[in-house]
DNA sequence: TCAAAAGTGTTCCTGTTACACCCATGT
DNA sequence: ACATGGGTGTAACAGGAACACTTTTGA
Protein backbone atom coordinates (compact mmCIF):
# COMPACT_ATOMS: atom_id res chain seq x y z
CA UNK A 1 0.00 0.00 0.00
CA UNK A 2 1.47 3.39 -0.84
CA UNK A 3 1.77 6.05 1.76
CA UNK A 4 -0.91 8.43 0.55
CA UNK A 5 -3.44 5.64 0.39
CA UNK A 6 -2.39 4.47 3.84
CA UNK A 7 -2.98 7.95 5.23
CA UNK A 8 -6.23 8.55 3.38
CA UNK A 9 -7.78 5.09 3.52
CA UNK A 10 -6.04 3.29 6.36
CA UNK A 11 -8.86 4.12 8.72
CA UNK A 12 -11.12 1.86 6.70
CA UNK A 13 -8.77 -1.09 6.81
CA UNK A 14 -7.66 -0.81 10.43
CA UNK A 15 -9.52 -0.40 13.71
CA UNK A 16 -9.15 3.37 13.90
CA UNK A 17 -8.35 3.80 17.58
CA UNK A 18 -6.38 0.71 18.51
CA UNK A 19 -2.71 0.06 18.05
CA UNK A 20 -0.29 -2.64 19.09
CA UNK A 21 3.20 -1.97 20.42
CA UNK A 22 5.87 -4.57 20.98
CA UNK A 23 8.69 -4.46 23.44
CA UNK A 24 11.03 -6.89 21.72
CA UNK A 25 13.69 -7.99 24.15
CA UNK A 26 17.04 -9.49 23.17
CA UNK A 27 20.21 -10.38 25.06
CA UNK A 28 23.83 -9.89 24.07
CA UNK A 29 27.10 -9.31 25.92
CA UNK A 30 25.34 -9.70 29.28
CA UNK A 31 22.94 -6.89 28.44
CA UNK A 32 19.21 -6.83 27.81
CA UNK A 33 18.37 -5.05 24.58
CA UNK A 34 15.25 -3.50 23.12
CA UNK A 35 14.50 -3.27 19.41
CA UNK A 36 13.55 0.27 18.34
CA UNK A 37 12.73 2.17 15.17
CA UNK A 38 13.87 5.69 14.45
CA UNK A 39 11.45 8.27 13.08
CA UNK A 40 13.35 11.50 12.36
CA UNK A 41 15.12 12.32 15.62
CA UNK A 42 13.34 10.06 18.10
CA UNK A 43 12.60 6.37 18.43
CA UNK A 44 9.46 4.24 18.74
CA UNK A 45 8.61 0.68 19.65
CA UNK A 46 7.77 -1.63 16.78
CA UNK A 47 4.02 -1.50 16.36
CA UNK A 48 1.11 -1.47 14.02
CA UNK A 49 -2.63 -1.58 13.61
CA UNK A 50 -5.31 -4.23 13.69
CA UNK A 51 -7.10 -5.08 10.48
CA UNK A 52 -10.86 -5.46 10.53
CA UNK A 53 -10.37 -8.92 9.12
CA UNK A 54 -8.01 -10.25 11.79
CA UNK A 55 -8.06 -10.89 15.52
CA UNK A 56 -5.97 -8.86 17.94
CA UNK A 57 -3.85 -11.93 18.56
CA UNK A 58 -3.24 -12.41 14.87
CA UNK A 59 -2.29 -8.75 14.42
CA UNK A 60 0.22 -8.99 17.25
CA UNK A 61 1.89 -12.03 15.69
CA UNK A 62 1.85 -10.48 12.22
CA UNK A 63 3.40 -7.22 13.38
CA UNK A 64 6.13 -9.01 15.29
CA UNK A 65 6.95 -11.10 12.26
CA UNK A 66 7.10 -8.05 9.99
CA UNK A 67 9.86 -6.50 12.10
CA UNK A 68 11.82 -9.59 13.08
CA UNK A 69 11.04 -12.35 10.58
CA UNK A 70 10.32 -14.68 13.50
CA UNK A 71 7.67 -17.35 13.01
CA UNK A 72 6.90 -18.65 16.49
CA UNK A 73 8.36 -16.16 18.90
CA UNK A 74 7.64 -15.89 22.59
CA UNK A 75 5.01 -13.21 23.05
CA UNK A 76 3.06 -12.08 26.07
CA UNK A 77 0.51 -9.42 26.75
CA UNK A 78 1.92 -6.59 28.81
CA UNK A 79 -0.67 -3.90 29.45
CA UNK A 80 -3.17 -1.46 28.02
CA UNK A 81 -2.06 2.14 27.63
CA UNK A 82 -5.13 4.30 27.29
CA UNK A 83 -4.45 7.88 28.34
CA UNK A 84 -6.28 10.57 26.41
CA UNK A 85 -3.11 12.24 25.20
CA UNK A 86 -1.90 9.19 23.29
CA UNK A 87 -1.68 10.79 19.85
CA UNK A 88 1.15 10.28 17.44
CA UNK A 89 0.48 13.49 15.58
CA UNK A 90 3.82 15.19 16.07
CA UNK A 91 5.75 12.07 15.38
CA UNK A 92 4.08 11.39 12.08
CA UNK A 93 4.03 15.00 11.00
CA UNK A 94 7.76 15.31 11.42
CA UNK A 95 8.29 12.07 9.58
CA UNK A 96 6.11 12.78 6.58
CA UNK A 97 7.00 16.43 6.12
CA UNK A 98 10.62 15.38 6.29
CA UNK A 99 9.98 12.92 3.47
CA UNK A 100 8.17 15.53 1.40
CA UNK A 101 4.78 13.87 1.81
CA UNK A 102 1.71 16.10 2.05
CA UNK A 103 0.15 16.29 5.47
CA UNK A 104 -3.38 16.76 6.73
CA UNK A 105 -4.62 17.26 10.25
CA UNK A 106 -7.50 14.85 9.78
CA UNK A 107 -5.55 11.77 8.75
CA UNK A 108 -6.83 8.80 10.77
CA UNK A 109 -3.32 8.30 12.02
CA UNK A 110 -3.72 11.46 14.12
CA UNK A 111 -6.52 9.83 16.09
CA UNK A 112 -6.23 9.13 19.75
CA UNK A 113 -4.94 5.56 20.02
CA UNK A 114 -5.34 3.07 22.81
CA UNK A 115 -2.41 0.72 22.54
CA UNK A 116 -2.17 -2.92 23.50
CA UNK A 117 1.43 -3.52 24.55
CA UNK A 118 3.10 -6.91 24.29
CA UNK A 119 6.57 -8.04 25.13
CA UNK A 120 8.60 -10.71 23.40
CA UNK A 121 11.77 -12.56 24.28
CA UNK A 122 13.82 -13.34 21.20
CA UNK A 123 17.14 -14.84 20.26
CA UNK A 124 18.98 -11.94 18.68
CA UNK A 125 21.11 -14.34 16.65
CA UNK A 126 18.16 -15.56 14.62
CA UNK A 127 16.30 -12.26 14.56
CA UNK A 128 16.46 -10.27 11.34
CA UNK A 129 15.23 -6.75 12.15
CA UNK A 130 13.58 -4.94 9.25
CA UNK A 131 12.49 -1.31 9.32
CA UNK A 132 9.12 -0.47 7.80
CA UNK A 133 8.70 1.92 4.93
CA UNK A 134 7.87 4.79 7.28
CA UNK A 135 10.94 4.29 9.45
CA UNK A 136 14.41 5.73 9.10
CA UNK A 137 16.36 3.06 10.95
CA UNK A 138 16.04 0.00 13.17
CA UNK A 139 18.45 -0.84 16.00
CA UNK A 140 18.95 -2.58 19.32
CA UNK A 141 19.44 -0.49 22.46
CA UNK A 142 20.44 -1.37 25.98
CA UNK A 143 17.56 -0.92 28.38
CA UNK A 144 20.04 0.90 30.58
CA UNK A 145 20.67 3.41 27.83
CA UNK A 146 17.50 4.03 25.82
CA UNK A 147 17.47 6.96 23.40
CA UNK A 148 14.90 9.74 23.25
CA UNK A 149 11.59 8.14 22.37
CA UNK A 150 8.28 9.42 21.04
CA UNK A 151 5.31 9.66 23.35
CA UNK A 152 5.08 7.22 26.24
CA UNK A 153 7.10 4.53 24.52
CA UNK A 154 9.99 4.69 26.92
CA UNK A 155 7.72 4.02 29.87
CA UNK A 156 6.12 1.11 28.01
CA UNK A 157 9.57 -0.35 27.39
CA UNK A 158 10.56 0.01 31.02
CA UNK A 159 7.32 -1.54 32.18
CA UNK A 160 8.16 -4.61 30.13
CA UNK A 161 11.68 -4.62 31.54
CA UNK A 162 10.28 -4.61 35.06
CA UNK A 163 7.56 -7.12 34.32
CA UNK A 164 10.22 -9.54 33.18
CA UNK A 165 11.75 -9.46 36.64
CA UNK A 166 8.49 -10.72 38.10
CA UNK A 167 7.57 -13.19 35.40
CA UNK A 168 10.93 -14.91 35.57
CA UNK A 169 10.04 -16.16 39.05
CA UNK A 170 6.87 -17.91 37.98
CA UNK A 171 7.44 -18.87 34.37
CA UNK A 172 10.27 -20.59 32.58
CA UNK A 173 10.59 -18.32 29.60
CA UNK A 174 13.96 -16.67 29.59
CA UNK A 175 15.66 -19.39 27.54
CA UNK A 176 13.89 -17.70 24.64
CA UNK A 177 16.60 -15.06 24.87
CA UNK A 178 19.34 -17.63 24.27
CA UNK A 179 20.21 -19.81 21.30
CA UNK A 180 18.48 -23.22 21.13
CA UNK A 181 21.42 -24.81 22.91
CA UNK A 182 23.00 -23.16 25.89
CA UNK A 183 24.92 -23.92 29.04
CA UNK A 184 23.84 -23.53 32.65
CA UNK A 185 26.43 -20.81 33.22
CA UNK A 186 24.86 -18.93 30.31
CA UNK A 187 21.40 -19.26 31.81
CA UNK A 188 22.72 -18.33 35.23
CA UNK A 189 24.32 -15.16 33.95
CA UNK A 190 21.13 -14.26 32.11
CA UNK A 191 19.06 -14.61 35.27
CA UNK A 192 21.44 -12.34 37.13
CA UNK A 193 21.30 -9.74 34.39
CA UNK A 194 17.51 -9.76 34.37
CA UNK A 195 17.18 -9.60 38.14
CA UNK A 196 20.09 -7.16 38.45
CA UNK A 197 21.41 -9.08 41.42
CA UNK A 198 23.64 -12.02 42.29
CA UNK A 199 22.08 -15.46 42.20
CA UNK A 200 23.91 -18.26 43.99
CA UNK A 201 25.34 -20.69 41.44
CA UNK A 202 24.64 -24.09 42.97
CA UNK A 203 21.13 -23.26 44.04
CA UNK A 204 20.32 -21.90 40.63
CA UNK A 205 21.56 -25.00 38.87
CA UNK A 206 19.65 -27.37 41.12
CA UNK A 207 16.46 -25.35 40.78
CA UNK A 208 16.70 -25.27 36.99
CA UNK A 209 17.51 -28.95 36.61
CA UNK A 210 14.80 -29.74 39.14
CA UNK A 211 12.17 -28.38 36.80
CA UNK A 212 12.87 -31.22 34.41
CA UNK A 213 12.36 -29.09 31.33
CA UNK A 214 16.00 -29.25 30.25
CA UNK A 215 17.64 -31.99 28.24
CA UNK A 216 21.37 -32.53 28.70
CA UNK A 217 23.53 -32.74 25.60
CA UNK A 218 27.25 -33.51 25.18
CA UNK A 219 29.74 -31.19 26.80
CA UNK A 220 30.69 -27.99 25.08
CA UNK A 221 34.32 -27.65 24.02
CA UNK A 222 35.72 -24.31 25.10
CA UNK A 223 39.11 -22.72 24.70
CA UNK A 224 39.14 -21.06 28.11
CA UNK A 225 40.63 -22.66 31.19
CA UNK A 226 38.36 -24.66 33.46
CA UNK A 227 35.96 -27.50 33.14
CA UNK A 228 33.70 -27.76 30.09
CA UNK A 229 30.02 -27.12 30.73
CA UNK A 230 27.26 -29.34 29.40
CA UNK A 231 24.98 -28.04 26.69
CA UNK A 232 21.25 -28.04 27.35
CA UNK A 233 18.13 -27.55 25.31
CA UNK A 234 14.45 -27.46 26.13
CA UNK A 235 12.74 -30.86 25.99
CA UNK A 236 10.07 -31.24 23.31
CA UNK B 1 -28.77 10.99 25.81
CA UNK B 2 -31.78 9.49 24.10
CA UNK B 3 -31.56 6.19 22.34
CA UNK B 4 -31.82 7.37 18.77
CA UNK B 5 -29.07 9.91 19.28
CA UNK B 6 -26.95 7.26 20.98
CA UNK B 7 -27.36 4.97 17.99
CA UNK B 8 -26.85 7.67 15.37
CA UNK B 9 -24.18 9.78 17.02
CA UNK B 10 -22.58 7.55 19.65
CA UNK B 11 -19.74 6.72 17.30
CA UNK B 12 -18.58 10.31 17.52
CA UNK B 13 -18.55 10.39 21.29
CA UNK B 14 -17.04 6.98 21.93
CA UNK B 15 -14.01 5.16 20.55
CA UNK B 16 -15.90 3.20 17.90
CA UNK B 17 -14.21 -0.19 18.22
CA UNK B 18 -13.38 -0.50 21.91
CA UNK B 19 -15.59 -1.59 24.73
CA UNK B 20 -15.15 -2.37 28.40
CA UNK B 21 -16.73 -5.33 30.16
CA UNK B 22 -16.76 -5.89 33.89
CA UNK B 23 -16.96 -9.16 35.71
CA UNK B 24 -18.33 -7.90 39.00
CA UNK B 25 -17.88 -10.55 41.65
CA UNK B 26 -19.82 -10.73 44.89
CA UNK B 27 -20.13 -13.29 47.68
CA UNK B 28 -23.18 -14.46 49.58
CA UNK B 29 -24.26 -17.68 51.31
CA UNK B 30 -20.87 -19.27 50.61
CA UNK B 31 -21.24 -18.68 46.89
CA UNK B 32 -19.42 -16.47 44.41
CA UNK B 33 -21.83 -14.37 42.40
CA UNK B 34 -21.60 -12.43 39.15
CA UNK B 35 -23.62 -9.33 38.34
CA UNK B 36 -25.39 -9.60 34.98
CA UNK B 37 -27.82 -7.61 32.86
CA UNK B 38 -30.63 -9.10 30.85
CA UNK B 39 -31.26 -8.02 27.28
CA UNK B 40 -34.37 -9.78 25.97
CA UNK B 41 -33.75 -13.47 26.60
CA UNK B 42 -30.02 -13.55 27.31
CA UNK B 43 -27.63 -11.86 29.68
CA UNK B 44 -24.51 -9.69 29.32
CA UNK B 45 -21.73 -8.45 31.56
CA UNK B 46 -21.97 -4.83 32.68
CA UNK B 47 -20.03 -2.80 30.17
CA UNK B 48 -19.76 0.36 28.20
CA UNK B 49 -17.71 2.49 25.87
CA UNK B 50 -14.78 4.84 26.18
CA UNK B 51 -15.34 8.52 25.57
CA UNK B 52 -12.85 10.41 23.46
CA UNK B 53 -12.41 12.77 26.37
CA UNK B 54 -11.51 10.19 29.02
CA UNK B 55 -8.80 7.62 29.63
CA UNK B 56 -9.49 3.89 29.51
CA UNK B 57 -8.94 3.73 33.25
CA UNK B 58 -11.43 6.50 33.84
CA UNK B 59 -14.02 4.82 31.64
CA UNK B 60 -13.62 1.56 33.52
CA UNK B 61 -14.21 3.28 36.86
CA UNK B 62 -17.13 5.30 35.51
CA UNK B 63 -18.88 2.26 34.05
CA UNK B 64 -18.46 0.28 37.24
CA UNK B 65 -19.92 3.12 39.24
CA UNK B 66 -22.89 3.46 36.90
CA UNK B 67 -23.95 -0.12 37.55
CA UNK B 68 -23.06 -0.47 41.23
CA UNK B 69 -22.90 3.01 42.73
CA UNK B 70 -19.50 2.12 44.19
CA UNK B 71 -16.94 4.91 44.54
CA UNK B 72 -13.63 3.18 45.18
CA UNK B 73 -14.15 -0.45 44.30
CA UNK B 74 -11.49 -3.04 43.79
CA UNK B 75 -10.85 -3.32 40.07
CA UNK B 76 -8.27 -5.22 38.08
CA UNK B 77 -7.53 -5.68 34.43
CA UNK B 78 -8.39 -9.15 33.24
CA UNK B 79 -7.67 -9.59 29.56
CA UNK B 80 -8.23 -8.38 26.02
CA UNK B 81 -10.85 -10.16 23.95
CA UNK B 82 -10.21 -9.40 20.32
CA UNK B 83 -11.64 -12.06 18.05
CA UNK B 84 -13.03 -10.88 14.72
CA UNK B 85 -16.52 -12.17 15.42
CA UNK B 86 -17.04 -9.96 18.45
CA UNK B 87 -20.13 -8.10 17.23
CA UNK B 88 -23.15 -7.36 19.33
CA UNK B 89 -25.44 -7.01 16.35
CA UNK B 90 -27.98 -9.71 17.20
CA UNK B 91 -28.08 -8.74 20.83
CA UNK B 92 -28.87 -5.10 20.14
CA UNK B 93 -31.20 -5.82 17.29
CA UNK B 94 -33.37 -8.06 19.47
CA UNK B 95 -33.34 -5.49 22.23
CA UNK B 96 -34.29 -2.46 20.18
CA UNK B 97 -36.82 -4.10 17.93
CA UNK B 98 -38.42 -5.50 21.04
CA UNK B 99 -38.68 -1.99 22.43
CA UNK B 100 -40.16 -0.66 19.18
CA UNK B 101 -37.06 1.36 18.30
CA UNK B 102 -36.10 1.66 14.63
CA UNK B 103 -33.05 -0.30 13.62
CA UNK B 104 -30.32 0.18 11.01
CA UNK B 105 -27.56 -2.16 9.97
CA UNK B 106 -24.97 0.60 9.98
CA UNK B 107 -25.34 1.82 13.54
CA UNK B 108 -21.87 2.15 15.09
CA UNK B 109 -22.98 -0.25 17.76
CA UNK B 110 -22.87 -3.03 15.18
CA UNK B 111 -19.14 -2.51 14.72
CA UNK B 112 -16.64 -5.15 15.59
CA UNK B 113 -15.57 -4.43 19.16
CA UNK B 114 -12.38 -5.31 20.92
CA UNK B 115 -13.21 -5.46 24.60
CA UNK B 116 -11.04 -4.75 27.59
CA UNK B 117 -12.27 -6.98 30.39
CA UNK B 118 -11.86 -6.11 34.06
CA UNK B 119 -12.90 -7.90 37.17
CA UNK B 120 -13.99 -6.39 40.45
CA UNK B 121 -14.49 -7.76 43.93
CA UNK B 122 -17.33 -6.02 45.72
CA UNK B 123 -19.25 -6.24 48.95
CA UNK B 124 -22.75 -7.16 47.84
CA UNK B 125 -24.20 -5.58 50.95
CA UNK B 126 -23.14 -2.07 49.93
CA UNK B 127 -23.59 -2.57 46.21
CA UNK B 128 -26.67 -1.06 44.65
CA UNK B 129 -27.06 -2.60 41.18
CA UNK B 130 -28.77 -0.38 38.63
CA UNK B 131 -29.77 -1.49 35.15
CA UNK B 132 -29.09 0.91 32.29
CA UNK B 133 -31.80 2.28 30.09
CA UNK B 134 -31.15 -0.36 27.44
CA UNK B 135 -31.37 -3.27 29.86
CA UNK B 136 -34.39 -5.27 30.95
CA UNK B 137 -33.12 -6.46 34.33
CA UNK B 138 -30.06 -6.69 36.56
CA UNK B 139 -29.33 -9.62 38.85
CA UNK B 140 -26.70 -11.66 40.65
CA UNK B 141 -25.97 -15.21 39.50
CA UNK B 142 -23.91 -18.01 40.95
CA UNK B 143 -20.83 -18.69 38.85
CA UNK B 144 -21.79 -22.33 39.14
CA UNK B 145 -25.12 -21.60 37.49
CA UNK B 146 -24.77 -18.84 34.92
CA UNK B 147 -27.68 -18.25 32.54
CA UNK B 148 -27.52 -18.11 28.76
CA UNK B 149 -25.34 -15.17 27.82
CA UNK B 150 -24.78 -13.13 24.68
CA UNK B 151 -21.60 -13.58 22.69
CA UNK B 152 -18.47 -14.66 24.54
CA UNK B 153 -19.53 -13.12 27.84
CA UNK B 154 -19.83 -16.42 29.65
CA UNK B 155 -16.24 -17.32 28.85
CA UNK B 156 -15.10 -13.87 29.98
CA UNK B 157 -16.90 -14.38 33.29
CA UNK B 158 -15.34 -17.79 33.80
CA UNK B 159 -11.89 -16.49 32.94
CA UNK B 160 -12.28 -13.98 35.77
CA UNK B 161 -13.51 -16.73 38.08
CA UNK B 162 -10.39 -18.77 37.33
CA UNK B 163 -8.05 -15.82 37.48
CA UNK B 164 -9.26 -15.15 40.99
CA UNK B 165 -7.98 -18.57 42.06
CA UNK B 166 -4.48 -17.60 41.00
CA UNK B 167 -4.51 -14.01 42.21
CA UNK B 168 -5.62 -14.99 45.68
CA UNK B 169 -2.26 -16.69 46.22
CA UNK B 170 -0.21 -13.61 45.50
CA UNK B 171 -2.42 -10.69 46.45
CA UNK B 172 -4.48 -9.92 49.51
CA UNK B 173 -7.65 -8.77 47.84
CA UNK B 174 -10.49 -11.08 48.72
CA UNK B 175 -11.54 -9.14 51.80
CA UNK B 176 -13.14 -6.80 49.26
CA UNK B 177 -15.86 -9.42 48.96
CA UNK B 178 -16.71 -9.15 52.67
CA UNK B 179 -18.14 -6.33 54.78
CA UNK B 180 -15.61 -3.90 56.30
CA UNK B 181 -15.51 -5.96 59.47
CA UNK B 182 -15.32 -9.72 59.32
CA UNK B 183 -14.10 -12.72 61.28
CA UNK B 184 -11.30 -15.11 60.41
CA UNK B 185 -13.77 -17.98 60.01
CA UNK B 186 -15.58 -15.81 57.44
CA UNK B 187 -12.36 -15.16 55.56
CA UNK B 188 -11.40 -18.82 55.81
CA UNK B 189 -14.68 -20.00 54.35
CA UNK B 190 -14.34 -17.45 51.54
CA UNK B 191 -10.89 -18.73 50.62
CA UNK B 192 -12.21 -22.27 50.48
CA UNK B 193 -15.09 -21.25 48.28
CA UNK B 194 -12.80 -19.43 45.87
CA UNK B 195 -10.25 -22.23 45.70
CA UNK B 196 -12.95 -24.89 45.69
CA UNK B 197 -10.92 -26.97 48.12
CA UNK B 198 -10.33 -27.41 51.83
CA UNK B 199 -7.83 -25.10 53.50
CA UNK B 200 -6.45 -26.12 56.88
CA UNK B 201 -7.84 -23.80 59.55
CA UNK B 202 -4.87 -23.12 61.83
CA UNK B 203 -2.43 -22.63 59.00
CA UNK B 204 -4.78 -20.24 57.28
CA UNK B 205 -5.21 -18.12 60.37
CA UNK B 206 -1.49 -17.88 61.05
CA UNK B 207 -0.73 -17.02 57.45
CA UNK B 208 -3.35 -14.28 57.38
CA UNK B 209 -2.36 -12.75 60.72
CA UNK B 210 1.27 -13.06 59.69
CA UNK B 211 0.72 -10.61 56.85
CA UNK B 212 0.09 -7.88 59.40
CA UNK B 213 -2.59 -6.21 57.30
CA UNK B 214 -5.41 -7.04 59.73
CA UNK B 215 -6.41 -5.11 62.76
CA UNK B 216 -8.10 -6.99 65.58
CA UNK B 217 -11.31 -5.57 67.01
CA UNK B 218 -13.46 -6.69 69.98
CA UNK B 219 -15.03 -10.10 69.83
CA UNK B 220 -18.21 -10.60 67.93
CA UNK B 221 -21.29 -11.61 69.97
CA UNK B 222 -22.96 -14.60 68.38
CA UNK B 223 -26.01 -16.60 69.30
CA UNK B 224 -24.60 -19.94 68.19
CA UNK B 225 -22.76 -22.30 70.52
CA UNK B 226 -18.99 -22.12 70.70
CA UNK B 227 -16.40 -19.45 71.31
CA UNK B 228 -16.93 -15.96 69.90
CA UNK B 229 -14.60 -15.01 67.07
CA UNK B 230 -12.73 -11.72 66.93
CA UNK B 231 -13.70 -9.15 64.35
CA UNK B 232 -11.03 -7.86 62.00
CA UNK B 233 -10.68 -5.04 59.56
CA UNK B 234 -7.96 -3.96 57.16
CA UNK B 235 -5.43 -1.56 58.67
CA UNK B 236 -5.38 1.92 57.18
C1' DT C 1 50.48 -28.91 39.51
C1' DC C 2 47.99 -24.95 39.91
C1' DA C 3 44.33 -21.78 38.79
C1' DA C 4 39.90 -21.37 36.80
C1' DA C 5 35.41 -22.81 35.84
C1' DA C 6 31.74 -26.32 36.28
C1' DG C 7 29.25 -29.53 38.81
C1' DT C 8 27.60 -31.73 43.15
C1' DG C 9 26.88 -32.27 48.12
C1' DT C 10 25.96 -30.69 53.04
C1' DT C 11 24.15 -27.88 56.44
C1' DC C 12 21.21 -24.43 58.03
C1' DC C 13 17.11 -21.94 58.03
C1' DT C 14 12.49 -20.59 56.95
C1' DG C 15 7.94 -21.31 55.79
C1' DT C 16 4.30 -24.88 54.92
C1' DT C 17 1.62 -28.84 56.41
C1' DA C 18 -0.73 -31.73 59.66
C1' DC C 19 -2.25 -32.37 63.93
C1' DA C 20 -2.93 -31.67 68.81
C1' DC C 21 -4.33 -28.97 72.38
C1' DC C 22 -6.43 -25.09 74.86
C1' DC C 23 -10.21 -21.48 75.40
C1' DA C 24 -14.90 -19.58 75.40
C1' DT C 25 -19.75 -19.99 74.98
C1' DG C 26 -24.72 -21.99 74.72
C1' DT C 27 -27.45 -25.78 75.99
C1' DA D 1 -20.49 -31.06 81.91
C1' DC D 2 -20.20 -31.32 77.38
C1' DA D 3 -20.67 -30.35 72.63
C1' DT D 4 -19.47 -26.78 69.46
C1' DG D 5 -16.62 -23.72 67.34
C1' DG D 6 -12.54 -20.35 67.70
C1' DG D 7 -7.69 -19.68 68.70
C1' DT D 8 -2.82 -21.14 69.47
C1' DG D 9 1.17 -24.30 69.74
C1' DT D 10 4.27 -28.03 68.07
C1' DA D 11 6.48 -31.56 65.40
C1' DA D 12 7.50 -33.14 60.72
C1' DC D 13 8.62 -31.87 56.20
C1' DA D 14 9.91 -29.37 51.88
C1' DG D 15 12.18 -25.88 49.60
C1' DG D 16 15.50 -22.03 49.60
C1' DA D 17 20.07 -19.96 51.02
C1' DA D 18 24.90 -20.26 52.10
C1' DC D 19 28.92 -22.63 51.83
C1' DA D 20 32.16 -26.44 51.03
C1' DC D 21 33.95 -29.86 48.25
C1' DT D 22 35.00 -32.47 43.93
C1' DT D 23 35.83 -32.73 38.89
C1' DT D 24 37.66 -31.22 34.57
C1' DT D 25 40.32 -28.47 31.73
C1' DG D 26 44.23 -25.06 29.96
C1' DA D 27 48.47 -23.09 30.96
Image (cartoon, coloured by chain):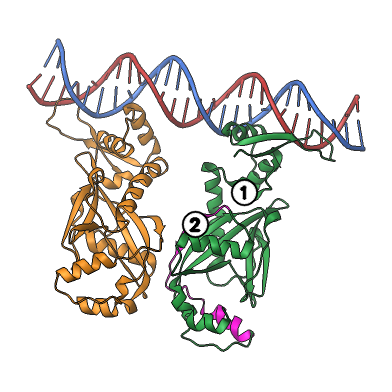
Chain colours: A green, B orange, C red, D blue
User: In the rendered structure, the residue with mark 2 lies on which chain?
Assistant: A
> Where's residue B38, x and y in %?
19, 59
Is residue A42 found left or right of B223 in the rendered image? Answer: right
Dot 2: within a 10 Å radius of its alpha carbon, few (fewer than 14), some, or many (20 or more) residues?
Answer: many
The quadrant of the picture occupied by the N terminus of chain B is bottom left
User: In which image quadrant can residue A127 be found?
Assistant: bottom right
Q: Earlier in the sequence, mark 2 or mark 1?
A: 2
* Residue ID at (65%, 55%): A26
Depth check, front residue: B212 or A140: A140
Mark 1 lies on a secondary structure that is helix
Q: Which mark is residue A176?
A: 1
Q: Would you name the residue on which mark 2 appears?
A: A78
Is residue A156 found left or right of A216 in the rendered image? Answer: left
Nearest to viewer (mark 2 / mark 1): 1
- Above or below, B168 relative to B147: above
> Where's residue B40, x and y in %?
17, 62
Can residue A93 be found in the magenta stretch? Answer: yes
The boundaries of the magenta stretch are: A73-98
Depth check, front residue: B199 or B208: B199
Q: Is residue B207 visible?
A: yes
> Where's residue A80, x and y in %?
45, 62
Amino acid sequence: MDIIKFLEEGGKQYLPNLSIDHVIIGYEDSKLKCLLLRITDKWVLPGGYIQFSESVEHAAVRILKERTGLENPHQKFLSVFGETNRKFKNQWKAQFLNAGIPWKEDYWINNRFVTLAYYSLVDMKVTAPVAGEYHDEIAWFDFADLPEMWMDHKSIAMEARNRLKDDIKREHIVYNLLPKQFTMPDLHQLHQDILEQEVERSRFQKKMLGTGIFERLPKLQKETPGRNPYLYQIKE
